[in-house]
Image (cartoon, helix red, strand yellow):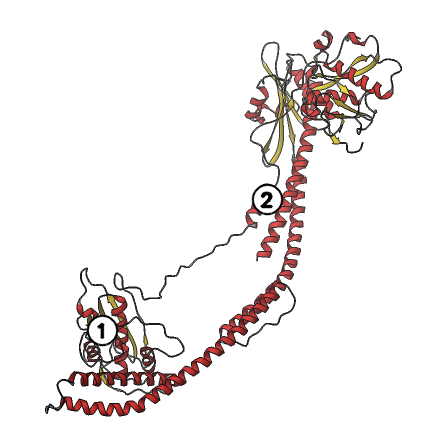
């Protein structure tokens, strides 16, 4: 699954990037061609109309503009001599109208901008994409600088949309094929990784089932092979450790069995003597000296306790060997619990809730140990007072115990005895709460107050606790519960927090984003495409308007007229006999001076301007520069787009360059030289189209 998501994400991302780049390239190329043609038509045809044309003139000019190579619809808006707004479109009554132009585009076209060094014209050409009935259109508009009609253009982008849809389908098919191939490769790669992991999981489960001789076959030197070696080493160490523990447990069982057996022989003789002493104590003859009577009673009591201890050890060995036998008797459950509590002086510390008259065939001695263990632990860990409940549910089984009372919901052969605790109110605890036997399974010989039962320790080895072994012998189980607001959480019990992890797909949002970006989308705001066309004719009526063109080498320089570059004649003085390298620098300096000169009165009337400032100088190549390189006193990167376009087009078309339509320019600070070219786009729109350039690496 993970490999599939990675492959899908990579394929969708690659296709989305390829589609986006191609869409931008297609739209930019198509829109720029249409917009340049529209501006040129506005310059040539709409600019030739009178300032206040008639409707017939507008209709005729719009039709001529629509017959250009781009085949767009045209709408011209102007005011006639009576200040009445007249319209002319290329499609007649049902053609392109002003309502088809977005309001935001009309506002941008008619907004006059402030003129500055960075903005030479008060009006600009704007465009915007719209969608009508699912078909994308390009809408553009511009005013004429110097007065005249305002023109709007509508061009369908349906051919480009079809091309983009074909591209999207092609990329989609390629993405699907790439996804299938990636999935197959990923599956093949995953198989080599997941198979060893699967074998490792099976081996781990077998090891958990107790098959400690489980081992993995190791081959290779990669990380999975190292993991298999580590698993084998762990399994070997675990098998050895378990074998050692089993040997120690066997030795422990033998020791307990031998010790309990050896203790019974001397204990039998001691018990016989103690019974004689006990008879003397109970006799009324008073044969026992009153001075030693307490000592004799202590010996009798401790001997009985020693006998109980040895019997418990024997009980443990019987449970280990599986030879324990129950001594069954009819037992009243409530009486048995009461006797257990009374024998250990817990009556003041324990509340008994048990019905009388419930009988079962049980082993009374072992049941006493079970109850003492449960109630003693409740007193020790639960609080100052304890409530003991005993639940007995009837079942039909071949258990050693059998009920003799009538069937009852609280009568059962399987013992599920619950000892829960509740806290006492604030204040000193009752003294009886501290009266407990040091060992819950030991029967006391008196009702004297004893200390609370000791904290149970977790037993090591395989010997079951006395109460647990006796419960198993009866076929019973035990559990403990904590009621709301009562008792303490048993020691060792911990609250567990389950953490859930949530996963999310990554490729689906990317696929949705790609699908949302398909096609040609409409734009919300107009986009500036440069300066608007001008009504200035950019033609000189005088044959020679420049006083500098009297003598010298005739040259041509590029001046600004409207939004484009136009050539004018000039002359540069070059001394006779000048070397070619020096001659190139002299010509370049002369051209630079002519560009910085203010246009003559006739040129100004025709609309000519210049953006090149005076004081700039030019020098020849340096030691490692190409022989045709020129370095300006100002870096080309610091010049305005208009000034750089004037210099590049003037130099590349003169003796200052090699005559291939390009020129190598650089700055005064030794920055890398660049080769600039003067193209038709630069001459047509120097404000937005920078001269293309490339870095010169060879000297």
Residue placed most toward the observer, 349 or 453: 453
Residue placed most toward the observer, 91 or 434: 434
Q: Are marks 2 and 1 in contact (CB under 8 Å)?
A: no
Q: Which residue is mark 2?
A: 514
The answer to whether 324 is drawn above or below residue 101 in the figure is below
- Element under label 2? helix
Q: Which residue is mark 1?
A: 436
Comparing labels 2 and 1, the label whose residue is closer to the camera: 1
The answer to whether 457 is drawn above or below residue 22 in the figure is below
User: Of callouts 2 and 1, which one flags the residue occurring earlier in the amino acid sequence?
Assistant: 1
State which quadrant residue 90 falls in: top right
State which quadrant residue 591 falls in: top right
Q: Residues within 10 Å of mark 1 (few under 14, many from 20)?
A: many
State which quadrant residue 39 falls in: top right
Q: Residue at x 61, y 48 (%)?
A: 12
The answer to whether 462 is drawn above or below residue 51 in the figure is below
Q: Residue at x 32, y 66 (%)?
A: 490
Residue placed most toward the observer, 666 or 512: 666
| Count of number-bearing discs | 2
- Element under label 1? loop
Could you say where residue 424 lies in the image, as x and y percent from the top left? 20, 63
Q: Is residue 161 visible?
A: no
Residue furthest to the right in view is 577
């Amino acid at each position: 699954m993970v490999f599939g998501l990675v492959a899908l994400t990579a394929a969708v991302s690659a296709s989305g990037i390829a589609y986006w780049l191609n869409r931008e390239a297609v739209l930019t190329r198509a829109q720029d061609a249409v917009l340049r043609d529209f501006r040129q038509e506005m310059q040539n045809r709409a600019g030739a109309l009178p300032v206040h044309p008639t409707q017939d003139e507008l209709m005729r000019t719009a039709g001529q503009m629509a017959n250009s190579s781009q085949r767009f619809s045209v709408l011209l808006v102007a005011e006639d001599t009576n200040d009445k707004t007249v319209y002319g479109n290329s499609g007649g009554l049902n053609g392109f109208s002003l309502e088809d132009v977005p309001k935001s585009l009309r506002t941008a076209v008619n907004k006059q901008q402030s003129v500055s060094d960075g903005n030479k014209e008060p009006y600009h050409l704007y465009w915007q994409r719209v969608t009508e009935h699912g078909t994308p259109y390009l809408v553009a508009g511009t005013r004429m600088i110097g007065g005249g009609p305002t023109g709007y253009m509508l061009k369908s982008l349906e051919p480009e949309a079809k091309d983009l849809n074909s591209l999207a389908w092609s990329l989609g098919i390629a993405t699907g094929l790439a996804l299938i191939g990636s999935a197959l490769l990923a599956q093949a790669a995953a198989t080599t990784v997941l198979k060893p992991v699967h074998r490792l999981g099976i081996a781990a489960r077998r090891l958990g089932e107790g098959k400690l001789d489980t081992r993995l076959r190791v081959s290779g030197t990669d990380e999975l092979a190292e993991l298999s070696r580590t698993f084998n080493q762990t399994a070997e160490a675990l098998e050895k450790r378990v074998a050692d523990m089993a040997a120690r447990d066997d030795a422990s069982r033998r020791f307990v069995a031998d010790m309990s057996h050896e203790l019974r022989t001397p204990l039998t003789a001691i018990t016989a003597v103690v019974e004689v002493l006990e008879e003397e104590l109970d006799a009324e003859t008073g044969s026992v000296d009153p001075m030693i009577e307490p000592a004799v009673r202590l010996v009798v009591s401790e001997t009985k306790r020693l006998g109980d201890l040895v019997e418990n050890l024997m009980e443990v060995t019987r449970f280990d060997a599986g030879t324990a036998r129950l001594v069954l008797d009819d037992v009243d459950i409530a009486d048995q619990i009461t006797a257990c509590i009374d024998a250990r002086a817990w009556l003041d510390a324990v509340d008994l809730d048990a019905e009388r008259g419930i009988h079962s065939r049980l082993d009374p001695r072992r049941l006493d140990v079970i109850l003492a263990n449960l109630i003693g632990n409740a007193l020790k860990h639960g609080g100052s007072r304890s409530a003991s409940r005993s639940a007995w549910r009837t079942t039909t089984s071949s258990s050693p115990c059998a009920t003799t009372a009538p069937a009852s919901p609280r009568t059962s052969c399987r013992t599920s005895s619950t000892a829960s605790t509740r806290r006492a109110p604030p204040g000193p605890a009752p003294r009886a709460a501290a009266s407990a036997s040091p060992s819950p399974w030991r029967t006391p010989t008196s009702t004297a107050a004893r200390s609370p039962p000791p904290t149970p320790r977790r037993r090591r080895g395989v010997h079951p606790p006395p109460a647990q072994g006796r419960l198993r012998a009866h076929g019973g189980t035990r559990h403990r519960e904590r009621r709301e607001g009562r008792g303490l959480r048993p020691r060792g019990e911990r609250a567990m927090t389950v953490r859930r992890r949530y996963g999310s797909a990554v490729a689906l949002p990317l696929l949705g984003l790609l699908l949302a970006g398909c096609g040609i989308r409409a734009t919300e705001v107009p986009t500036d495409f440069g300066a608007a066309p001008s009504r200035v004719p950019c033609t000189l009526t005088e044959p020679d308007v420049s006083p500098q063109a009297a003598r010298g080498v005739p040259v041509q320089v590029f001046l600004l007229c409207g939004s484009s570059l136009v050539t004018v004649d000039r002359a540069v003085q070059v001394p006779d006999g000048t070397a070619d390298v020096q001659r190139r620098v002299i010509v370049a300096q002369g051209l630079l001076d002519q560009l910085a000169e203010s246009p003559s009165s006739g040129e100004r009337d025709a609309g000519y301007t210049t953006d090149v400032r005076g004081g700039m100088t030019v020098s020849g190549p340096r030691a490692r520069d190409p022989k045709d390189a020129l370095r300006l006193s100002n870096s080309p990167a610091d010049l305005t787009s208009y000034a750089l376009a004037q210099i590049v087009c003037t130099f590349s078309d003169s003796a200052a360059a090699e005559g291939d339509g390009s020129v190598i320019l650089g700055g005064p600070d030794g920055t890398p030289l660049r080769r600039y070219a003067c193209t038709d786009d630069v001459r047509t729109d120097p404000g937005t189209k920078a001269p293309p350039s490339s870095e010169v690496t060879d000297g």
